[in-house]
Image: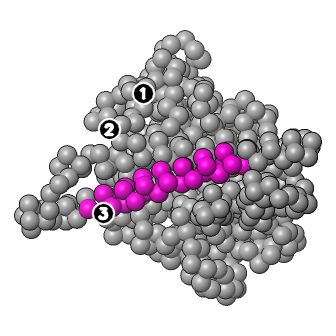
Amino acid sequence: MLRNMKKILSLMLLGLSLNVIAQNQAPPKNWFNLDPVDNKVNGVSTEKAYEYLKGKESKTVIVAVIDSGIDILHEDLKDVMWVNEDEIPDNGIDDDSNGYIDDVYGWNFIGGKDGQNVDKDSYALAREYKRLMPVYEGKTKSDFKKKELASFEYWEGVKAEFEKGANESAGQMQLLQNVDTQLRRFNKLFQAYYMLDTITYDVVQKINSTDQTILQGKAILSSIYEATDKGLLLDSLIYLLGKDLEQITSQAVAYDLDFDPRYIVGDDPNKLDEVGYGNNDVMGKGTDNFHGTHVSGIIAAKRGNSIGIDGIASNVRIMALRAVPDGDERDKDVANAIRYAVDNGAQVINMSFGKSYSAHLEYVYEAIEYAASKGVLLVHAAGNSAEDIDEANNFPNDYIGRKKNMSNWIEVGASDSGLDENYVGGFSNYGKRNVDVFAPGVAIYSLAPDNKYQDAQGTSMASPVTAGVAALLLSYFPDLKAEQVKDILMKSSRSLDGLNVSKPGSGEQVRFSELSVSGGIVNAAEAVKLAESMTLKKKR
């Protein structure tokens, strides 16, 4: 065990320590809504925007959230959920003839007619590997004609990435299981040895024994504590490690070539434009809907109700579209969820998900173009791999294989509060050509299922911040077109005035302006001013 301590600590620093090491100076719970000048934190100035908008009328805007499911009964969300008024609940009839039966709050594209729901799914990489393996496995370049070599080389890339990921996942799972076993073992041992209910770092440091087992436990626990948080109870460390172990276990399942939960849905996977498959359980009974609930709260948690938090947009309705499992979403579901949102009145669609492979890319592009033709704005998370997505793939997107980016698509990176000189989420993807703007995505306090509230971080949080500001603009300036909203958000974004920041992944010092097209952070107050000036010019 001691011989593997460096590996264990390396893994803990990558996983567990992210959960327990807090910023030296924690931002206010509502920091994403605050103002950089007045509040000294890099929020998007939501409250200041509403000061400018006092006395102005607003129009209800529908924002579709394509995600893991939403707790539509949450105390801070239930009053802002979209309701399909043309559908009579639970009568088993497609009253509005849109192809979806009893779609009162939206639709679940990864559920079955018997009420079951897909929880976990495989990675798109694993599905692509499985698809190509019968064609290419065991063959070499010499087996193919020159015009077929590109496809073979693509397979070689898929194979290498899959095998690396699967092996690393299996190794990490074994390592974490070993660490978990040892932590539990020494926790019980020291509780009994010292007759204590809880073990702390200070208790561990006071251990003085000649027993080699006791000394081994002291060395292991001391190293783990020093790599994470000395203030935690050992019970808490074990709990957090268990959460990481759950994630690694899910990852191992996602690499399993024999794992395919699609039978639950019961659709025809080859019929991409299929309508009506799935069910109306937008909460996703029996699955984890934390992610979608948290995202929805950022956009639209009821403002001014003295409960929980205030979302960004005050006059919106959240349309719930469940299409994202624990694993990778499928192109068919993403595209059909976009089409459903467009056809049922959404003006903004938030998409806090992504993956590195897309088997039916063209079908997703067709849906994006359909949304563009109907004037619907799509807001997408740039991803959490600390990569330059001018070079690396992050699907869905609006640029691969296209001459120019779509005018109705906003790609969002994650910014930090600015406290402790942290301005960019260290996990965030970036790209001078393909990330449009940044928005708060670190330590974001929002809704959790069962009337709870919790911090989370990721570009998954930055995207709904941006979608919320977009909805705010459309609510008060309803004549704006999708491309105008995008233009306003980018032109009104707050630059950091030539500030150098740590580039995600490498830590290299670069200008913040080099990480995105706009070079700035979304700012609601400045966006409102710009939208108002455009409206006044139009009236003249």
Quickly name the residue at label 3: 157
Taking the magenta stretch, the answer to whether it contains residue 166 is: yes
* Image color mode: one colour
Q: CA distance from mark 1 to mark 2?
A: 14 Å
Mark found first going from the N terminus, 1 or 3: 3
Quickly name the residue at label 2: 272
Residue 160 against residue 502 in the figure, above or below = above
Amino acid under disc 2: Leu
Q: CA distance from mark 1 to mark 3?
A: 31 Å
Q: Residue 276's spot in the image, x, y percent?
A: 41, 26
Taking the spot 91% from the left edge, 46% from the top edge, the residue there is 194
Extent of the magenta region: 156-184
Q: Residue 382's spot in the image, x, y percent?
A: 53, 62
Where's the N terminus, which quadrant?
bottom right
Label 3: which secondary element: helix
Which of the pair 401/3 is nearer the observer?
3
Residue sitting farthest toward the front: 210
Label 2: which secondary element: loop
Quickly name the residue at label 1: 265
Taking the magenta stretch, the answer to whether it contains residue 10 is: no
- Residue 429 visible in this rendered orientation of the protein: yes
Amino acid under disc 1: Val
Mark found first going from the N terminus, 3 or 2: 3
Q: Which mark is residue 433?
A: none
Taking the spot 47% from the left edge, 41% from the top edge, the residue there is 253
Label 1: which secondary element: loop
Taking the spot 71% from the left edge, 74% from the top edge, the residue there is 423
For the residue carrying disc 2, how many other residues have a C-alpha within 10 Å: few (<14), some (14-19), or many (20+)? some
State left or right for residue 300 relative to residue 435.
right
Dominant secondary structure of the residues highlighted in magenta in the image: helix
Where's the C terminus, which quadrant?
bottom right
